[in-house]
Image: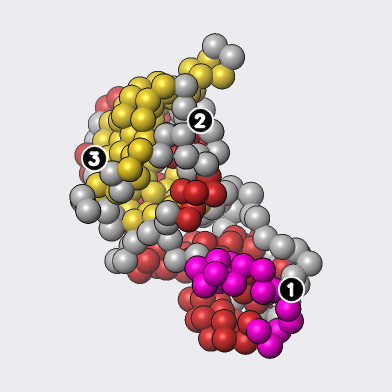
Amino acid sequence: MTDTIIETRGLVRRFSGFTAVDGVNLKIARNSVHALIGPNGAGKTTVFNLISKFLAPSEGQILFNGRDITRTKPAEVARQGMVRSFQISAIFGRMTVAENLRIALQRPTGLSMNFLRGDTVLAGLDGRVDELLDAVGMLDWRDRPAAGLPYGRKRALEFATTLALDPELMLLDEPMAGLGTEDIERITALIAGEAQRRTILMVEHNLSVVAELADRITVLARGNMLAEGNYADISADEAVIEAYIGGDID
C-alpha cells in the first residue's frame, strides 16, 4: 500500500469542444485532508465527477490505491471504498432520519435488502445509528421525517450517511454550502476527527474552513492546476490572488 491513495495523470475532460479539465495531475496523500479550490468555472466539480466516475475522462488516467479505475463504474469504486457527497442533499424524504442511516449502514453488512423485512431484523444497527446521529448533533431528530428537516440538518444527515458507509476515501462536494455558523463548526470538527482514520478530498468555497482543515490545497483555474501547497503558500501566491478576486484571498 502506497502513501498515495488517489492519483490522476494528465486528466482531461472536453464537452463539445470546450475543455473543462486540462491535464490535471493530482496526488492525494493517504489519511490527509486535501482541498480543491478555485473561482467559479475552474473545473473543481468536473474533477470530482471524473475521480468518482460519474464522468469518463477524454484523456488521462485515474489510480485508486494503485489500481487503474479510469474505466471503472461508480458503483464498483464505491465498493472499493470511495464514497462521495453532492452539493444537493440526497436523502430519502419519506423516511425518518434513523431509517436513512439504517439504509446506509446495511451496505457494509451485506444486508442491503433487509430493510424490506421489518424493524426487528435491523435492530442491531440502532446503536451505530445513534452514534452517528450524536456525532452530527442530530440525536434528538432521529424519528423525524427527513423531508421536513431544515437545510443545514439535511446536509448533516447526508454527512452521517456518508460516514455510515465507512469509506476509505470521502469526497465531499461543498460540505459547508448553505450551513449556518453552528453547523459549520460542528461539521468542521467532525471532518477533522474523521481525517485521523480516512482520507478526505473536498471542494470547498469557505476558505476559513479550508485553512483550518486542509493539509494540502490544489488551486484550479480554467481547468488547469494553478498552484498547490499548504494554505500559507497558496494564500501568498500572486497568481492565485489574481485568479480569485485580484486581491488578498483572506
Q: Is residue 187 left or right of residue 231?
A: right
Q: Which residue is mark 3?
A: 229
Residue 43: horizontal and vertical position, in percent?
47, 30
- In the rendered image, the quadrant that contains the C terminus is top left
Q: Using the rendered image of the protein, determine whether residue 175 is visible from the camera's viewpoint.
A: yes
Q: Nearer the viewer, residue 3 or 33?
A: 3
Q: Earlier in the sequence, mark 2 or mark 1?
A: 2
Q: Residues within 10 Å of mark 1 (few under 14, many from 20)?
A: few
* Residue pictured at 54% horizontal, 49% vertical: 75
Tell me the kind of residue under disc 2. Ala
Residue bounds of the magenta highlight: 104-121
Mark 3, secondary structure of its residue:
strand
* Residue pictured at 67% horizontal, 74% vertical: 114
Q: Residues within 10 Å of mark 3 (few under 14, many from 20)?
A: some
* Residue pictured at 68% horizontal, 88% vertical: 120
Residue 138: horizontal and vertical position, in percent?
59, 76
Q: Using the rendered image of the protein, determine whether residue 48 is visible from the camera's viewpoint.
A: no
Q: Earlier in the sequence, mark 1 or mark 3?
A: 1
Label for residue 116?
A: 1
